[in-house]
Amino acid sequence: MALGLAAGRSAKINRIVSPVIYLLHPLPKAAFLPIIMLVLGLGEVSKIFLVGFIIFSQILVSARDAAERAPEELVDSVQSLGASKIDVMRHVIIPAVLPNLFTGLRVSLGTAVAVLFLAETFATDSGLGYLIMDAWTRIAYGEMYAAILALSLLGLCLFIIIDLAEKLFCPWENR
């Protein structure tokens, strides 16, 4: 998020970050799963890295675009009162972009749960993804549906946490 905010507020940083985004964001990062597992092993670290790797660019793009759309008249007003760049970021930019950042987190959350399922179906013997695929191959449909439900409940709980965080950090948005 910090890199996205910096790119959205600084043309110089954006000139460096944007080409990287345009090259890496469209790539099917799940295709890197075998390489990630080869380098990081078959454990939890590779799963966490893959999820982070895939949602990084989504959150970066959301943060950058939201920071670019922050109202310049508010920035100018605060600067005319003697605010420093840090003050502008803290009192104008961050509050202006937080609702969009939470939206980006929600979108990325759906992707993250799907990637978690994918990562747990390869070269592992644990996790909900493994349980779903294992139950499917054993024709244990009750276990398979229970694991799918558990994955859905995981996503639901994470969505609720994001909603609560948004209510806490964006009280002006609560309706």
Image: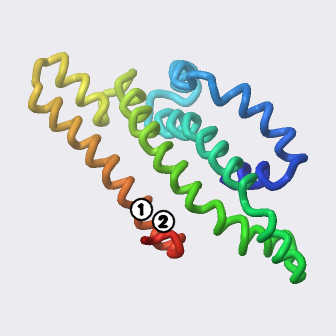
Quarter of image, res 129: top left
Residue at left offset 72%, top offset 75%:
91
Q: Quadrant of residue 61?
A: top right
| Quadrant of the frame with the C terminus | bottom left
Q: Position of residue 112 (x, y in %)?
A: 45, 39
Q: Amino acid at mark 1?
A: Asp
Local SS, label 1:
helix
Q: Relative to residue 21, is residue 158 depicted above or below? A: below
Task: Decide if residue 129 is on the left or right side of residue 174.
Answer: left
Q: What's the amino acid at mark 2?
A: Glu
Q: Which residue is mark 1?
A: 163
Q: Secondary structure at mark 2?
A: helix
Residue closer to the observer: 129 or 104: 104
Q: Residue at x 21, y 40 (%)?
A: 149
In the image: residue 74, left or right of residue 174:
right
Which residue is at a point 16% across and 33% down the rendered structure image? 145
In the rendered structure, find residue 22 and report the number of the disc placed on it. Answer: none
Q: Quadrant of residue 100?
A: bottom right
Where is 159 relative to 34, above or below? below
Left or right of 2 in this view: 143: left
Residue at 23 percent of width and 43 percent of height: 150
**CA gap, disc 1 and disc 2:** 5 Å
**Residue 135 position (above or below residue 126):** above
Q: Position of residue 80 (x, y in %)?
A: 89, 78
Residue beneath label 2, please? 166
Where is residue 34 shown, x and y percent of the image?
52, 19
Residue 83 drawn at (x, y percent): 85, 78
| In-front residue for pair 161/88 | 88
Q: Residues within 10 Å of mark 2 (few under 14, many from 20)?
A: some
For residue 134, side relative to residue 45 (left or right):
left
In this rendering, is residue 59 above or below 134?
A: below
